[in-house]
């Protein structure tokens, strides 16, 4: 198979994430003003509730399939056999998820007000399974799903402005959200035939696949404890209004963090393949590059988000969501910790088949997060949920890093890695200064935000170049080559 460029893959996957980012950025200011805060609370509670059953249906199959399937991608017969077995297991878990979801709606009376919205979000379960996006990750083919995303996002935006016009239209918003995220997954299943033949099989080789899948699944459950439990516990201890306010902070946090994690995701199949074939020198080189690029991007993103939290809230959601400003400032720190935690788990521990370590770390972190939520929410409300998330992300980052220290130590302690981190920290000081000056100098919200972002990027880049940062010079050289080719 032709080796694909990590840079090109990162571009396509980041472009797809930018589309996922632009969709709520375009639609959310409109929706948050049209729908009531309570309507947004019902929407977000239903979405989070269905995510638990999406987790059951997923069963850790996608992560396992990428790790194991990367070894077979050059042999169509073997990858077809492997994919069919994994897909069949995924179908069984999907059926179980639907049985549990429908049963919970019948048993728990306090969910009756959410039934319609939950059933709409429930369509994601089957379409996610049919989508088999792990096939595209194995083959590092991000161009197809990126083009597909562009088309479906555009259509979804049109539908949103046509169908969502009053406070009671949160069900239409839910349906459009589902359509935007998984509506094209039937096309995915058909297009996957290009790589392998996927079908249901009588014997999916349970004995071989089930144990590692269940360990990864248990880790995913633990992650959900500190990702989704915040909103659930907040809804139980407070009300739909508190959930609606907190949902703004979480939405922005997830969009910003998701953009960076998309760049990391493209390295997972490459790292899994290199580690599986014991090509450790190449593995360390790729991992070193990933860590340096991440530190160069995640620190300024988080600091910029902290400095511009109030402006971003006003632009995206309006005055009625201003109480979420402090919550956003707190949770923005979690972007740094969560992305490094993801590198240590998905890019190192999982390829090294240390999923049991990931499970242990995430279970401990999940328990800590739940305890902190019950302690902090009564006193700090949605600010408490943000703080508990940050503590959880910091905890799992430290534990994951410790669990793979023998692998990452040569990379982390490299002179270039440490210098790159220090350069980024110094560059962030420049961002803080720029944002403070723009806050003094501009009265217009839009002008202040635009100039803060543009000048911060210029300042940060200039500081990195003055410090002779090799990654900044590399990006500058690429930009020069592109400009010369266009002229």
Image (cartoon, rainbow, N blue to C red):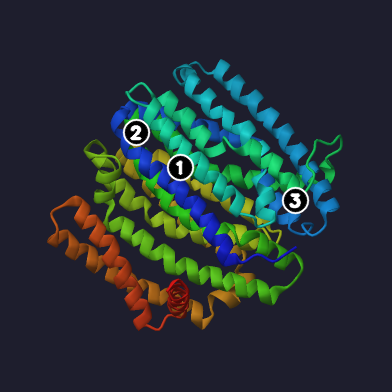
**What's the distance in space between the residues labelled 1 and 2, CA to CA?**
33 Å
Is residue 487 visible to us here?
yes
Q: Quadrant of the C terminus?
A: bottom left
Residue at the spot of label 3 = 195
Q: Nearer the viewer, residue 255 or 330?
A: 255
Residue at the spot of label 2 = 31
Q: Up-down: is 81 above or below 169?
A: below
- Please report contact status of discs 2 and 3: CB closer than 8 Å, yes or no: no
| Rendered location of residue 90, percent (x, y) | 72, 38
Is residue 48 visible to us here?
no
> What SS does tag 2 mark?
helix
Left or right, 75 with respect to 471, comes to right
Residue at the spot of label 1 = 371
Tell me if mark 3 has few (under 14), some (14-19) or many (20+) residues whose alpha carbon lies within 10 angstroms of its own.
some
| Rendered location of residue 183, percent (x, y) | 57, 35
Tell me if mark 1 has few (under 14), some (14-19) or many (20+) residues whose alpha carbon lies within 10 angstroms of its own.
few
Mark nearer the viewer, 2 or 3: 3
Q: Earlier in the sequence, mark 2 or mark 3?
A: 2
Seen as rendered, the residue at the extreme front is: 487
Q: Up-down: is 450 above or below 196?
A: below
Residue drawn 49% across and 47% down? 368
Mark nearer the viewer, 1 or 3: 3
Which numbered dot is residue 483?
Answer: none
Q: Nearer the viewer, residue 381 or 452?
A: 452
Residue drawn 36% across and 42% down? 26
**What's the distance in space between the residues labelled 1 and 3, CA to CA?**
46 Å
Q: Earlier in the sequence, mark 1 or mark 2?
A: 2
- Please report contact status of discs 1 and 3: CB closer than 8 Å, yes or no: no
């Amino acid at each position: 198979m032709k080796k694909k460029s990590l840079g090109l893959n990162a571009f396509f996957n980041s472009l797809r994430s930018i589309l996922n980012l632009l969709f709520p950025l375009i639609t959310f200011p409109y929706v948050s003003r049209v729908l009531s805060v309570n309507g947004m609370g019902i929407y977000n509670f239903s979405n989070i509730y269905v995510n638990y059953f999406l987790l059951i249906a997923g069963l850790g199959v996608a992560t396992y399939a990428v790790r194991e399937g990367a070894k077979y991608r050059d042999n169509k017969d073997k990858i077809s056999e492997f994919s069919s077995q994994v897909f069949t297991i995924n179908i069984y878990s999907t059926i179980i998820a639907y049985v549990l979801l429908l049963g919970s709606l019948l048993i728990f009376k306090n969910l009756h007000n959410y039934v319609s919205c939950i059933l709409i979000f429930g369509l994601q379960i089957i379409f996610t399974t049919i989508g088999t996006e792990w096939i595209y990750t194995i083959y590092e083919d991000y161009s197809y799903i990126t083009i597909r995303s562009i088309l479906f996002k555009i259509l979804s935006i049109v539908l949103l402005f046509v169908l969502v016009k009053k406070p009671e239209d949160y069900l239409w918003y839910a349906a459009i959200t589902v359509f935007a995220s998984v509506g094209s997954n039937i096309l995915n299943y058909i297009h996957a035939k290009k790589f392998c033949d996927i079908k249901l099989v009588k014997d999916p080789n349970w004995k071989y696949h089930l144990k590692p899948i269940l360990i990864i699944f248990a880790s995913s459950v633990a992650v959900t404890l500190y990702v989704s439990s915040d909103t659930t516990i907040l809804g139980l201890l407070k009300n739909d209004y508190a959930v609606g306010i907190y949902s703004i902070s979480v939405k922005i946090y997830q969009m910003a963090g998701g953009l960076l994690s998309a760049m990391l995701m493209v390295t997972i199949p490459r790292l899994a393949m290199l580690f599986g074939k014991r090509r450790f020198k190449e593995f360390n080189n790729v991992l070193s590059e990933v860590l340096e690029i991440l530190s160069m991007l995640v620190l300024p993103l988080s600091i910029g988000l902290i400095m511009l939290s109030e402006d971003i809230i006003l632009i995206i959601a309006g005055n009625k969501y201003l109480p979420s400003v402090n919550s956003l400032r707190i949770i923005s720190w979690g972007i740094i910790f969560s992305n490094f935690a993801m590198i240590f788990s998905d890019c190192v521990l999982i390829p090294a088949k240390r999923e049991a370590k990931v499970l242990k770390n995430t279970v401990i972190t999940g328990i800590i997060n739940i305890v902190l939520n019950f302690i902090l929410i009564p006193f700090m409300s949605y600010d408490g949920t943000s703080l508990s998330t940050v503590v959880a992300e910091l905890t799992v980052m430290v534990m994951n890093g410790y669990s793979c220290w023998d692998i990452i130590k040569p990379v982390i302690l490299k002179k270039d890695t440490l210098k790159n981190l220090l350069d980024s920290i110094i560059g962030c000081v420049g961002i803080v200064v720029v944002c403070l000056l723009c806050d003094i100098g501009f009265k217009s919200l839009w002008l202040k935000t635009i100039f803060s972002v543009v000048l911060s990027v210029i300042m940060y880049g200039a500081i990195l170049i003055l410090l002779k940062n090799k990654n900044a010079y590399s990006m500058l050289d690429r930009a020069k080559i592109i400009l010369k080719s266009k002229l």
